[in-house]
Image: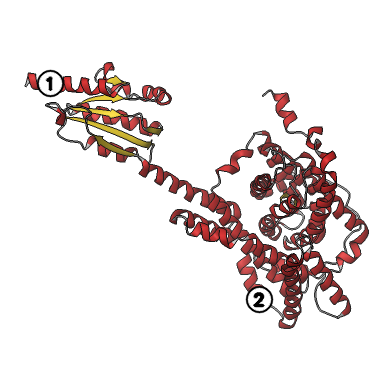
Amino acid sequence: MSVAQRVRSLLPSLDDYRNLRHTWRSDLVAGLTVGIVALPLALGFGVSSGVSAEAGLITAIVAGILAAIFGGSNVQISGPTGAMVVVLLPIVAQHGVGAVATVSVLAGLIVIVAGVLRLGRAVSFIPWPVIEGFTLGIALIIFLQQVPLLTSHDQAGAGEHSSNAVIAAGQAIAAADPAYVAWAVGAAAIVAVIMVLAPRVHRAIPGSIIGIVVVTLLCAVVPTPLARIGTLPNTLPAPSLPNLNPAVVGSLLMPAVTVAALAAIESLLSARVAASLEDTGPYDPDRELVGQGLASIGSGVFGGMPATGAIARTAVNVRAGGRTRLAAIVHSLVLLTIVLVAAGPVGMIPLAALAGILMVTAVRMVQLSTVRSIIRSTRSDAAAFLLTALVTVSFDLIVAVIVGMVLAGIVALRHMSRAAGVHREELAGEPQPGDERIAVLRLDGPLIFTSADRVLELVTGIRGTQVVILRLSQLELVDASGARVLAEIVQSLERRGITVLIKGVRSDHDRLFRSVGVLASLRHHRHQFNDLDAAVAHARSHVQRAEAAG
């Protein structure tokens, strides 16, 4: 693929909308549905991140449109997400609210570079137990992050606690006013009950919106101490570049890398899940990264937060009939319309109602059947799952993914090491005198650095033989360490006066064996064979000559 073709593949085209004339009606309905579902989530994630409800709405509107147009998925819905909130809260606590826009722009640039470098397929290397452990940890954090909102009289109250969700929840409970908590928990419970019951009546009923409306109306009629979202602007703010001077960029670069990694991972996972739900057409992971990067930059320029693909909202879009990018664009336009015409009523929503929505959302993120499946699978996968979840809650999301992948990698290498084996085979055909001095050793599985020493010990430990035939055709994978050990095996046996014959070097291993010196270690170049019968005949001739000489 030429450079020009590569660039074109990362940009929007009319082909993105080739099915629009057949799907526009269902796309409009899906966009409206997702817009209604996304409103309380955008508000809630904005508040929970320590920024503002306004920032959450801006992110859903601006990032939602940009990711829809420039992204690599036909049905992805982008905006603020719970995972991103988990990362942003400590950034806000350490660097202040003003740093979020800068981090958003920097992270967007990093994600774009990842897309241009074609790193979109990298998410496929993250094991399933690690992804699920990551999801469980995020769900726990999102749930715990709502505790300060249920105990504080103002939305800034969450920022007065530790950036660790577990500690912050404990601090909030310790400092809570029992009377306020009773009102807040009651409001959250009303929303949660409506969200749980609404789908049982009809799956299309937006329980979160109904719950918010009910609680907001009750609070308008009955005097309560509950904190509200507050005044929201009835228009989008003017775009402006955040502070990008070198000192600020230097202090925020590592947080931006963390945000970028999370944005890339979550967006690609969401796009992959969406592609498996229905026939929505292929998705381009590299273009998806470019689109999500532009979305975060655009969001930051308008004062929003970093954006990612949202798995739950994307699934709602697909199930509601969304098939082209029009649905995601409509979702953002619905939210923009709400900002323009209903900012006042939205500002009256109690924060406790948003906390109830996010708590239910956190619970729904975890599928008990999935947890049971992983726990019952293998000890190593269960350990990776639980460790990833624990590190996510205790430390950092990206650290959790790294720890989980390292553990999974160690386990995989251990399994590969155990798969490598050395098996002695009987000589085919009628036995002949001296056959007991010939050992045919079949090497199986991967011969890599983790298994090489064990294979070396097994082969060189052989006794009472004059000729060893190494059958290598069953070796699946060989690295430089494995090839070097093969050369050491040949050299060690030859030093003991044992003739080594090699049979069945695969074509994809030949170059490695020659460069590392496996074949050069043989006593004679004719000691390499493609046929086992020929190798056995040659071995018998060696034994016969040795007996005659003796």
User: Vertically, is 164 above or below 184?
Assistant: above
How far across and down, in percent of the image, does residue 16 sit?
78, 36
Residue identified by numbered label 2: 173
Work out whether residue 348 or residue 50 is closer to the camera in this orientation and state it: 348
Q: Name the quadrant containing residue 15.
A: top right
Q: In screen coordinates, is 201 left or right of 140?
A: right
Residue 124 seen in the current view:
yes
Q: Which quadrant holds the N terminus?
A: top right
Whole-percent x and y of residue 115? 68, 37
Q: How many numbered callouts?
A: 2
Residue 433, above or below 314: above
Q: Residues under labels 2 and 1: Cα distance? A: 87 Å
> Where 458 falls versus 90 (above or below)?
above
Q: Residue at x 42, y 44 (%)?
A: 413
Residue type, label 2: Ile
Crowding at dot 2, Cα within 10 Å, few <14 / some 14-19 / many 20+, comes out as some
Q: What secondary structure is found at the residue carrying circle 1?
A: helix
In this view, the residue farthest toward the right is: 341
**Observer able to see residue 244:** no
The quarter of the rendered structure image containing the C terminus is top left
Foreground mark, 2 or 1, reads: 1
Q: Which residue is mark 1?
A: 544
Q: Residue furthest left?
A: 550
Please name the residue shown 73% across and 58% down the image. Answer: 96
Please provide percent x and percent y for residue 65. Answer: 81, 46
Give the vertical position of 220 relative to 287 (above or below). Answer: below
Quarter occupied by residue 287: top right
Q: Is residue 70 left or right of residue 453?
A: right
